[in-house]
Image (spheres, helix red, strand yellow):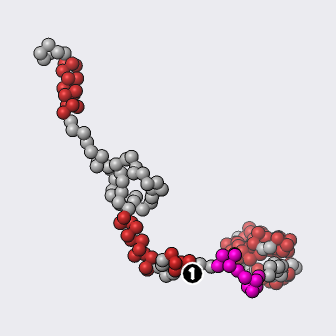
Amino acid sequence: MLLGQSIFQSVLTRLKRERDDEQPVEAAADFRVRGLGTGFVVSTTDEEPETGATGDTNAYFADLADISELEPGAGTQQEMEAQAPPSPGDLTSETPQPQPVEPVEPSIPVHLTRLTTDEIAGELAIVDVDTEATLNDKRRRFAKTNHPDGVAERFRPAATTRMQIANLLIDQAIRAREIHARMFG
C-alpha cells in the first residue's frame, strides 16, 4: 500500500491522472491511403462530411480534362450536343421510316434430308479396321453436326432420326468387334 491506498486505488488514480494529462488527438489520423477512393464516391450535398476522412478530389477531376482530349469524339458540352442524334421531336416527315422485316423461316440443312440407313452409313464411313475408340470419335463428330439440340425446333424430328440410326450403326459395329475379339481373340 502506498500512502494509505490499496494497489487498486493507486492504479485507478494513476490512470485518471494520465487521461487528464493527454492532449486531445486531432482528426488527422485517418487510416487510409490518400487518393485511393477519391474518385469512387462524390458527395451530392454541399455539407462537409462529419468524419475526418475527406479526400482531395481536385486531382481526380483535373485528370478528366486530359482524358477527354485523348478520347475521339469527346469534347465540350456544345460539341457533344452537336454530335448527338436528333431527338424524336426534331424528326421531320421527310425521313423514311424503316419497314418491319418479317422473319425468314430457315430452310432445312441438306444433311438433315438424308434419312436412310445407307446414306448415314456412308457419312459415318465405318470400316473393318475401326477400333472402339475411332467409332466413338465418329459418333461424337456426327453428333456435333446432327444432334437435335443443335438444330431449329422444326428440324428436330429429322435430326433425332439421323442420330438414332447413327447410334444404332455404331453400336452394331462395336458389338461385332467385341464378338470377333471373343471368337478369334
Q: How many marks?
A: 1
Q: Which residue is mark 1?
A: 83
At 64% from the left and 79% from the top, the residue drawn is 86
In this picture, residue 150 sits left or right of residue 17:
right
At 34% from the left and 53% from the top, the residue drawn is 32
Q: Which segment is the magenta one?
A: 86-97
Quadrant in which residue 113 is drawn: bottom right
Q: Is 45 placed above or below 184 here?
A: above
Task: Give x and y (percent) for residue 82.
Answer: 56, 81
Task: Please say whether residue 56 is visible from this viewpoint.
Answer: yes
Please check the rendered image and state whether residue 132 is part of the magenta-colored stretch, yes or no. no
At 75% from the left and 86% from the top, the residue drawn is 94
In this picture, residue 75 sits left or right of residue 132:
left
At 36% from the left and 57% from the top, the residue drawn is 55
In this picture, residue 126 sits left or right of residue 30:
right
Give the residue type that dot 1 points to.
Gln
Q: Quadrant of the image for the C terminus?
A: bottom right
Q: Main secondary structure of the magenta part?
A: loop
